[in-house]
Amino acid sequence: MVTSTTGSTLLLPLSNAVQLPIDQVNFVACQLFALLAAIWFRTYLHPSKTNSLIRHIVATLLGLYLALFCFGWYALHFIVQSGISYYIMIVVGVENMHKYCFVFALGYLTLCQIATVYIFDYGQYSADFSGPMMIITQKITSLAFEIRDGMFCKEEELTPSQRSLAVRRMPSPLEYLSYNCNFMGILAGPLCSYKDYITFIEGRSYQLKQSEVNGKEDTNYERKEPSPNTIVVHKLIVCAVSLAFYMTATRILPVEYNIDGHFLQTTSVPTRIIYLYLSLMAARPKYYFAWTLADAINNAAGFGFQGYDRNGEENWDLVSNLNIKNIESSTSFKMFIDNWNIQTALWLKRVCYERATFSPTAQTFMLSAIWHGVYPGYYLTFFTGSLMTMAARNMRNNIRHYFLQSPELKLIYDIITWVATQVAISYTVAPFVLLSVRPSLQFYSSWYYCLHLVCILVLLVLPARARKKAKEEKNAVCPPLTKTSKVETISAHNSHPSTNNNSNQREETAWRRPSAAQ
């Protein structure tokens, strides 16, 4: 397959053999190289064998090499964006750095996306340099807010999650560039907190206390350093299955067939609904492959260890970006969102939702659309998603409690909501895959904008019950769980104490709970 690329053409014969664009082949090859480099990094540059300076330098140089191989001179954008953002933090100061870094990083990303889409390759749904810049933008903006929280804001002004993520000193240029451009996450992320990354580089991520079942910390409990080998193999198997499914299913079930004239005229509505669901489901394994492989790379390097659960089992989901089982079995928009692109959802919450002074939901959807890119289909998807979210919230608050009277009714409710959620998700994200205005509007018009009208009708007819009242009813039906365990770090004296990011994730999903029905 012949295609243009600014990166290396070394693998062009392989690209032609597998009939995939050269940029996608380069991406996969670099990620596999990063996986091997991660194993070498954990084995030969272990914190017990070298210092954090060497680990920072090697992680950064490897990351920049991979970027250069994939994107050629376009990789300079990663350094330019990071360098200017660091300069802004130094010059502006801690009080306002978050605003200037946010505007610059997001603006720079948007300009690059505009150039990629409208100047170079409109409609080419492939790997381009703006993808890594999306992750770097998340890191730049997150760190700016975390530094301000740690060096300017008062403790009482912060939420518990903000206090745990707050950074108490300015990072050095090397630490900053290493965080943004390390080989483990430069191509596909995922986003991680700065404190978690520094804790990993300095070799303190394993210095954890084992919690007893009753919640008391057993400080005398000793464990050897956990090995990620088993979980890495498991995630690589998931990657292989996802890639094989994507390579076959997407050719059999193209999303574009949903707007084919002959298909629309000759098929029944139930058949169209089933095909819509199957075609969008077939599009998801691409993300399963990329995100799971990125997670495996981090784990192979020794990054991502979350601690131990109450049964003493190792947990390696600190930077996991999705939960495939929960995605495919989602019975609500909330459940789908909670398990899809998890780190991006947490970024939206941390830099936008919990800091917005008005209309946090609308602002969060707008930021998500801008961050994703400039294709019109993205904006149609997030506009539709906002309607779905508000309608689902009203539906849940007004209807769900009627189905909690017995297990049988609850089972019926779960089946109905699973079908409704899968159809609604497919309907919502179709423009995200179709990208352009004409096919996206053609898709919605072929369905007569039916779900848009249903959402508007629900918002007009069903009252939006107070969140507090809904929460009280929820607690009456299902009392909140008591805290049974906690994972903390031993090294409280260090300058960058590690954070229990996954625990924060569980707490922070509360911001999305009002967003959808179950």
Image (tube, rainbow, N blue to C red):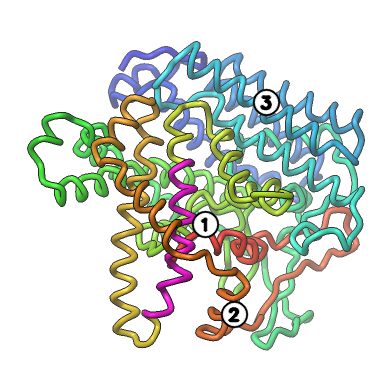
Q: How far apart are marks 2 and 3 (CA)?
A: 42 Å
Main secondary-structure element of the magenta-colored stretch: helix
Q: Where is residue 149 in the image (x, y as percent from the top left)?
A: 84, 50
Residue 509, label in figure: none
Q: Distance between the residues labelled 2 and 1?
A: 44 Å
Q: Quick one: label 2 or label 1, which is nearer the N terminus?
A: 1
| Image depth: mark 2 or mark 1 in front | 2
Residue 214 visible within the image:
yes
Q: Where is residue 199 in the image (x, y as percent from the top left)?
A: 76, 53
Residue type at mark 2: give it: Glu
* Left or right, 106 with reference to 265: right
Towards the viewer: 48 or 376: 376
Identify the residue at horizontal 43%, vertical 40% (top origin). 381
Residue 409 inside the magenta-drawn segment: no
The kind of residue on which mark 1 rests is Asn
Secondary structure of residue under mark 2: helix
Label 2 sits on residue:
472
Task: Sort mark 1 into few (<14), some (14-19) or many (20+) by Cα contacts within 10 Å.
Answer: few
Residue on which the image places disc 1: 229
Q: How far apart are marks 1 and 3 (CA)?
A: 40 Å
Specify the quadrant that holds the N terminus.
Answer: top left
Residue 380 drawn at (x, y percent): 44, 36
Question: Magenta segment, which residues?
Answer: 382-402
Label 1: element kind: helix
Residue matched to label 3: 107
Q: Residue sitting at 74 percent across and 60 percent down? A: 161
Along the viewing direction, whichever of 312 and 190 lies nearer the viewer: 190
172 with respect to 319 (left or right): right
Image coordinates for residue 368, horizontal then vertical, percent: 57, 40
